[in-house]
């Protein structure tokens, strides 16, 4: 089967939306879910077939044309994205009667464009093609962020648009320089020749890439916009931002980094950059009283943790990074969807309202997600954090190890505060209805957090293979340009 | 106009600072221009001969980097959707000024010509400079002219949506046809004899895609322009 389907089908769906929305009131929603389910099925069948890395050419052969590389690593991300997007659409369907979006057809178009772009970022082996997907993902995210058109939403959309535009200028500039000096846009060809460039050019390109992607992977000085965007967007959309979009950017950034800088020239710099962003985010999170902002800061902390793990550039640490990616995506998805269920009455909840809400089911689910985020044993979050700490200890990076531990403690402080609010004894006045369908989504997410945590070995081999493939620069080059 | 009074000093100094930064950056960059003047396009030129298309740029844009073009179309599509969403058409408030009689007559006369020219640029994109993007924008500029000159002119929303949907869907479907017949997405599955190079019917699937791109760009841009026009500035 062709990996192009993962991108072309959602695009086709996006283009065909006006046609589908004429077929009936629910036709659009159902076909969207059906398409995402079939993509999920396709990804699963590829997983079971478990073939080696495949390259799919578009129009012409590799060095000149665009090609998509489906390896264990990219398949893992594709699987995660399609799974989360399917769950998202199902959740939206279940709560739709009470809480449908205005202009629903446009909402579905944007969702599928976002899916296509995130998958494209992960699969593409051509840096300009990556830029195109960078733009598609960006623009759909800006619009989704401003979707509700309240003052806060418009502000966040504008902020997102401006930072995103700056980021893409930096990325575009890097691509121009690369094309000027290497004469190719193919990642493998660039990887081959990057080391031969003059030092200053290499430095300039690396810096431009770091700044361009830095905005999107939310590292410390460039992440000032994130919390405002999370606060302005609806919780539903935030689930996508922290579950899918940022993970796609993280993957593609480190994919490019491993290819261009195999010797790990900036490793130490990146490691401490990640460490500092983690501490800053967690400390800033301590004082938040708005739930969305709080979760946004926690997202920043976790993303920085993933950043550190990827920046370690060894197989154990990258495997840990994949574990944290999965754990964080599932848990944050749960938290934001739970917040969306709670927010039916009021947007932008203050944390005190957790004391008022009477919904044991949602409380239990949020509890599970928080425990996993904190890295409590028996949850998949623990496995990731443990593996990362282990590999930091093996490498003898004690400062970073201390930083990770301190950041985890700070995160624990505010999550325990929230848990205290949720367990608060007293009269609970606000009853929140959760439909059976919504419950099923939450239970499946929660169960996967638990099951993966109790049996981490079931996916450990797969993740290790993914880490090996992602780090193996020579195999990638041989695959694309031969010899 | 007194610049000092109208524009705050902070803005001016901001502009000055950015200008200095940009100049510094350009100076630095110029020092690192690649010394060997390699010609990056040569390999593409050689490959182009197989496709039988006279305009190499078209082959590169539509065929060799076809997926990028599909992506750019998607970008335009989402951008137009965003404009439509943020400035939802409101028939109550639109540009109020009645334009001059001469402008009205002239633009009515010019519009068919602009349309024809746009279509020409679009259809001959594989033979001469131009193509879908340019042709589409020319058509949209004709629509803009009518929007400015005629107070009550409006392209029906359904027409725009119909064009953009048909164009978008058929682009992806052509891609799938290539996947089915040639095992590569967007493959050139229509026979394209090199002997026909320079004829209107040559290049197989390439002119077809460029026309689709033109329709898509024309309808999206017209939609954006119309959405922007239908807001009066007092909202």
Image: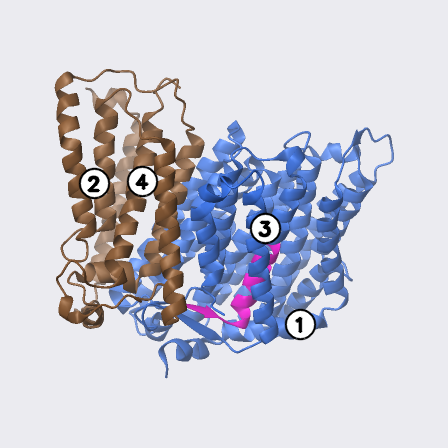
Magenta region, main secondary structure: helix
Q: Which residues are magenta?
A: A67-85
Tag 3, which secondary structure?
Answer: helix
Residues packed near mark 2 inside 10 Å, few (<14), some (14 to 19) or many (20 plus): many
Q: Earlier in the sequence, mark 4 or mark 2?
A: 2
Q: Chain of mark 1?
A: A
Q: Is residue A281 visible?
A: no
Q: CA distance from mark 4 to mark 2?
A: 11 Å
Same chain shared by disc 3 and disc 2: no
Residue on which the image places disc 3: A33
Question: Color of chain B here?
Answer: brown
Q: Which residue lies at the image location 87% right of the left edge and 32% below the top edge?
A: A426
Does the magenta portion include A317? Answer: no
Label 4 element class: helix
Residue B202 shows in this picture: yes
Label 1, on which residue? A460
Residue linked to disc 2: B138
Q: Residue A181 placed where, x, y %? A: 26, 66
The residue identified by callout 4 is B219
Structural distance between the alpha carbons of marks 2 and 1: 56 Å
* Residue A14 spot, x, y in % from top left: 46, 48
Q: CA distance from mark 3 to mark 1?
A: 30 Å
Secondary structure beneath disc 2? helix
Query: How dense is the environment of label 1, judged by Cα within 10 Å: few (below 14), some, or many (20 and up)?
Result: some
Q: Colour of chain A?
A: blue
Q: Quadrant of the C terminus of chain A?
A: bottom left
Camera-side mark, 2 or 1:
2
Mark sitting earlier along the chain (3/1): 3
Q: Are there few (<14), some (14-19), or many (20+) residues within 10 Å of tag 3? A: some
| Left or right placement of residue B231 versus residue A344 in this view | left
């Amino acid at each position: 089967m062709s990996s192009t389907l993962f991108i072309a089908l959602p695009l086709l769906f996006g283009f065909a939306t006006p046609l589908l929305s004429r077929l009936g009131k629910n036709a659009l929603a159902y076909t969207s879910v059906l398409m995402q389910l079939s993509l999920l099925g396709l990804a699963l069948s590829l997983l079971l077939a478990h073939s080696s890395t495949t390259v799919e050419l578009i129009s012409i052969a590799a060095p000149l044309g665009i090609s998509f590389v489906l390896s264990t690593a990219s398949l893992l991300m594709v699987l995660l994205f399609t799974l989360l997007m399917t769950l998202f659409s199902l959740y939206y369907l279940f709560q739709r009667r009470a809480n449908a979006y205005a202009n629903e057809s446009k909402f579905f178009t944007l969702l599928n464009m976002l899916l296509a772009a995130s998958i494209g970022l992960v699969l593409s082996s051509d840096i300009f093609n990556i830029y195109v997907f960078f733009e598609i993902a960006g623009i759909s995210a800006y619009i989704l962020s401003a979707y509700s058109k309240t003052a806060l939403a418009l502000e966040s959309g504008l902020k997102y648009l401006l930072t995103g535009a700056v980021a893409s200028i930096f990325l575009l500039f890097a691509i121009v320089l690369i094309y000027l000096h290497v004469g190719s846009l193919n990642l493998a060809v660039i990887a081959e020749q990057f080391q031969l460039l003059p030092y200053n050019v290499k430095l300039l390109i690396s810096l431009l890439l770091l700044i361009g992607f830095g905005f999107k992977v939310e590292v410390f000085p460039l992440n000032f916009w994130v919390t405002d965007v999370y606060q302005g967007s609806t919780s539903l959309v935030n689930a996508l931002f922290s579950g899918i979009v940022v993970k796609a950017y993280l993957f593609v950034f480190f994919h490019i980094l491993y290819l261009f800088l195999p010797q790990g020239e900036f490793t130490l710099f990146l490691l401490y950059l990640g460490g500092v962003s983690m501490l800053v985010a967690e400390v800033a999170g301590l004082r938040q009283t708005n739930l969305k902002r709080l979760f946004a800061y926690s997202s920043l902390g976790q993303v920085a943790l993933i950043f550190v793990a990827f920046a370690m550039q060894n197989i154990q640490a990258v495997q840990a990074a994949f574990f944290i990616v999965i754990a964080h995506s599932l848990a944050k998805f749960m938290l934001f969807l739970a917040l969306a269920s709670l927010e039916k009455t009021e947007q932008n909840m203050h944390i005190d309202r957790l004391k008022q809400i009477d919904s044991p089911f949602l409380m239990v689910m949020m509890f599970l997600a928080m425990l996993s985020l904190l890295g409590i044993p028996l949850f998949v979050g623990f496995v990731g954090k443990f593996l990362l700490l282990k590999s930091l200890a093996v490498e003898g990076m004690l400062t970073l190890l201390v930083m990770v531990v301190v950041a985890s403690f700070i995160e624990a402080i505010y999550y325990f505060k929230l848990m205290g609010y949720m367990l608060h004894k007293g009269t609970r006045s606000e009853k929140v209805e959760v439909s059976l369908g919504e419950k099923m989504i939450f239970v499946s997410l929660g169960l996967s957090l638990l099951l993966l945590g109790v049996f981490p070995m079931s996916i450990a081999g797969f993740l290790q293979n993914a880490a090996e493939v992602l780090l193996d620069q020579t195999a990638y080059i041989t695959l694309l340009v031969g010899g | 106009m007194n610049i000092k009074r109208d524009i705050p000093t902070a803005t001016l100094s901001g502009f000055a600072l950015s200008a200095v930064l940009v100049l510094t950056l350009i100076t630095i960059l110029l020092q690192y221009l690649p010394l060997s003047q390699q010609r990056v396009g040569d390999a593409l030129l050689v490959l182009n001969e197989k496709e039988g298309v006279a305009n190499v740029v078209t082959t590169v844009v539509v065929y060799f980097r076809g997926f990028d073009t599909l992506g750019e179309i998607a970008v335009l599509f989402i951008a137009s959707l965003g404009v439509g969403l943020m400035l939802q058409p409101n028939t109550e408030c639109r540009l109020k000024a009645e334009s001059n009689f001469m402008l009205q007559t002239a633009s009515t006369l010019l519009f068919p010509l602009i349309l024809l020219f746009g279509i020409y640029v679009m259809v001959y994109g594989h033979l001469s400079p131009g193509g879908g993007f340019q042709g589409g924008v020319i058509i949209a500029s004709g629509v803009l002219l009518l929007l400015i000159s005629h107070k009550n002119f409006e392209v029906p929303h359904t027409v725009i949506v119909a064009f953009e949907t048909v164009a978008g869907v058929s682009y992806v479907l052509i891609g799938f046809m290539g996947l089915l017949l040639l095992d590569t997405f967007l493959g050139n599955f229509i026979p394209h004899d090199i002997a026909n190079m320079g004829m209107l019917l040559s290049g197989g699937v390439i002119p077809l895609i460029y026309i689709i791109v033109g329709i898509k760009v024309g309808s999206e841009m017209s939609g954006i322009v119309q959405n922007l026009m239908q807001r009066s500035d007092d909202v």
